[in-house]
Amino acid sequence: MKNASIVDALEALIGIEGEAQNLIDAVTAALCQHGYDEIDAVDVASARRSAIVKIIDERQRTAESEGLVHTIEVVGAFRSEVGGAGRPQVGDDDKLSLAKQGRRQVAAILASMRALNPDEFESFGAALIRSLGASVS
């Protein structure tokens, strides 16, 4: 399994609200779900740890630069844990905690917006712009 596929499996396993857990254990669990023997999975998880962290960090940077929400992030004092990007962690300030809680709502909001027909979307857009203080002169 390629490293990017392992990160895909971690994202599916942990999700945006997932509690932080040991990175090696999480990778091992993801690999076992994809048919790896547990001993082989532990070996792969240990050998590829830094490459997997690098991919997670890159996905996080890319998502943030594009204004999107990333699913998981590497956390902990020694960056040895991985958890959902929407779950506040110990040590997060109030602003970051609120931002993480907001991340959990993005998928539902986008799904609702995508379900709108063109007229509903136009009405939504107009209401949003009005709520931001715009008016017709």
Image (tube, rainbow, N blue to C red):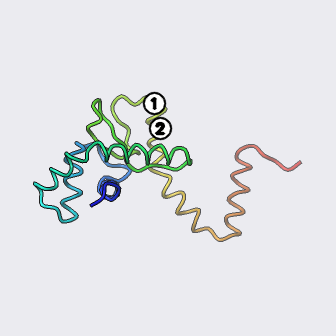
- Mark 1 is on which residue type? Asp
Which residue is identified by label 1? 94
- Mark 2 is on which residue type? Leu
Q: Kindly check if marks 1 and 2 are in contact, taking CB atoms under 8 A apart as contact.
A: yes
Q: Is residue 104 above or below residue 78?
A: below
Q: Which mark is residue 98?
A: 2
Point 71% across, 54% down: residue: 127
Quadrant assignment, res 119: bottom right
Q: Is residue 102 above or below residue 108?
A: above
Q: Quadrant of the N terminus?
A: bottom left
Task: Give 99 or 22, whichever is nearer the viewer.
Answer: 22
Point 12% across, 56% down: residue: 38
Residue 105: x and y in percent read: 48, 51
Residue 16: x and y in percent read: 38, 50
Q: Say left or right for 68 vs 26.
A: right
Mark 1 and mark 2: Cα distance apart in space: 6 Å
Residue 8: x and y in percent read: 35, 57
Q: Of all residues shown, which one is farthest toward the left?
A: 39
Residue 91: x and y in percent read: 36, 28
